[in-house]
Image: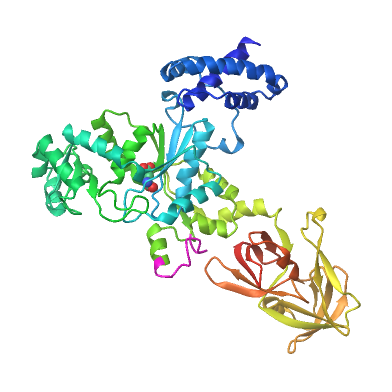
Amino acid sequence: MSKDLQKLIRRWTLANAIRHEGTANVNAVVGKLIAERPELKEEIEDLKESVEETVKKVNKLTLDEQRGELEGLGAPERPEREEEEGLPELPDLDKYPTVVTRFAPNPNGPLHLGHVRTALLSHEYARKHDGKFILRFEDTNPANAREEMYDLIRENLKWLGIGWDEEFLQSDRLKTYYKYAEQLLRDENAYICTCKSSEFKKLRDKSKPCPCRELDSREQLERWNGMLEGEFDEGEAVVRIKTDLKLPNPALRDWPALRISTASHPKVGKRYRVWPLYNFSVSIDDHEMKITHVIRGKEHEVNEERQRQLFNHLGWDYPTAVHHGRLSISGVILSKTKVMEGIQEGKFEDYDDVRLGTIAAIRRRGFTPQAIKQSILEIGITPVDSTLSLDTLATENRRIIDDKANRYFFVKNPIELTIQKVPEIEEAKLRLHPNHLERGDRTLPLDRKDNSLIVKIPSKDFSKLSEGKVVRLKDLLNFKLTSRDPPEAEFESFKVADVLKIQWVSAEAIKARVLKPDGTQDEGLSEPEVSKLEPGELIQFERYGFVKLEKIKPEIEAVFTHN
Ligand code: GLU
């Protein structure tokens, strides 16, 4: 075995050990090596043996020794995946042995496209650096955390291909937050304020301390016990983090860190009455979970300053923060409040109402995770605010689904037309996909009476017909309108001609409804073969648009994806 290869094995083993708290795994290391040097597959048995030996040795070292050695060797090089090419490198990579990122949703509402940006970027970077990606539910407001959101968020992330290595619920971690709160109170870096909030604000705005701030740590800890034991009601006491009262932005002065809430929490019920506020729990967790890069929207910049103050009190180093701009999505409703209120008022059906920009809705409409991923990663991590239009997303999606979606006819607002003098034919055979002969044909049965053919065509197309002008029933025959009322026509020929081609159905057509993005519905008839498909399938109704089937029986129900 060459020296070079030995070194490579050592490096990957160290990197893997560091990622897993000091214990490397033989298979994981072998996998990495083969990904980097596919030719090693030929000698996999030898390779395994030396990896096993190296793993044994490396696992005996302490984490610090492993880190030190890896730093000396330089991080292993690894092939980049294609979709990562566009993302700029994270700052401070050399500061950390491995990259740890997190996505920290509040389960008070469904995920939407805006959140996905943070989640995707955090996930991509963790994967790119073979690091760790954590999912953390920030559910410390018992009054707004909702039971159904945990699974919905998990499901949405999985669907997007965002898998996590570890999961935490902040509501499981109250004891940890209490421990730090006590430490801060003991060290006089925090105090318990029982002032009316209006009184506190008056003083704070003048850079003056409130009387509670002056009490010593013994009294603070007494008050703390009082908070925990129910001596104070909601709103009567908060733990505040001491800051410089002269800070230019009053919002940063002595900010609240924990407060009382007696609402029942979906996970822990009424077990706790003192709950951390966002800036407190996020800080404790980012530190305890060893997050190296916090990727977040720049709307959190002020919060971050608060968090940095707390890190200072606790003597911790703040992770590297990377801010991205706000992402708005035109054409759909994103705001969590609007979504939740709308559902409560019955204005929206559910979290997947097609008018919403939630992941549930976008998924329901037939957008693919790949299209979402590509469109959002393309915007990247820029601090500038950006807008993603659904049209852009649709263009990306069309590229992906056009090849997959088979073609069918849907006749919106059908008008019955009788075409006379049609030669002997009983059915029509049409291709399932114009570019995929191998997928075969579909059959459209014909409704015949004597030598007439009865078809239904879209009323919009019917209105374009004029008497005597030749038109083609797509993939079947050409005809000429002879009368508008009643709608009648005459067979012209079977020859493919360069004339208006219209979609049609005839015998056994099934009622179909398509839900449009604005919440309205198109009604019409679909060709019978659609009833053989499965709900969930994406198809194209020709000259109408792509749709995702939701229900097949007794009638077709579909959701409009895009043109
Ligand atoms: N729970 C926060 C949010 O959803 C996390 C943001 C952060 O600290 O980066 O906005």
Q: Is residue 459 magenta?
A: no
Identify the magenta region.
344-356
Residue 302 visible in the current orientation:
no
- Measured as percent of width and height from the top left, residue 494 is found at 88, 72
Q: Dividing the picture into quarters, in which one does residue 287 lie? A: top left
- Measured as percent of width and height from the top left, residue 156 is found at 51, 51
Q: Quadrant of the C terminus?
A: bottom right
- Measured as percent of width and height from the top left, residue 476 is found at 83, 71
- Measured as percent of width and height from the top left, residue 386 is found at 46, 49
Q: Is residue 375 left or right of residue 1?
A: left
Which residue is more in the foreground, 272 or 106?
272
Which residue is more in the foreground, 218 or 306?
218
Above or below for 484 versus 275:
below
- Extreme residue toward the bottom, this view: 485
The residue lying at 23 percent from left, 38 percent from top is 181
Which residue is more in the foreground, 35 or 93?
35
Above or below for 158 versus 70:
below
Q: Quadrant of ligand 1?
A: top left
Q: Is residue 349 magenta?
A: yes
Q: Is residue 201 left or right of residue 54?
A: left
Residue 278 visible in the current orientation:
yes
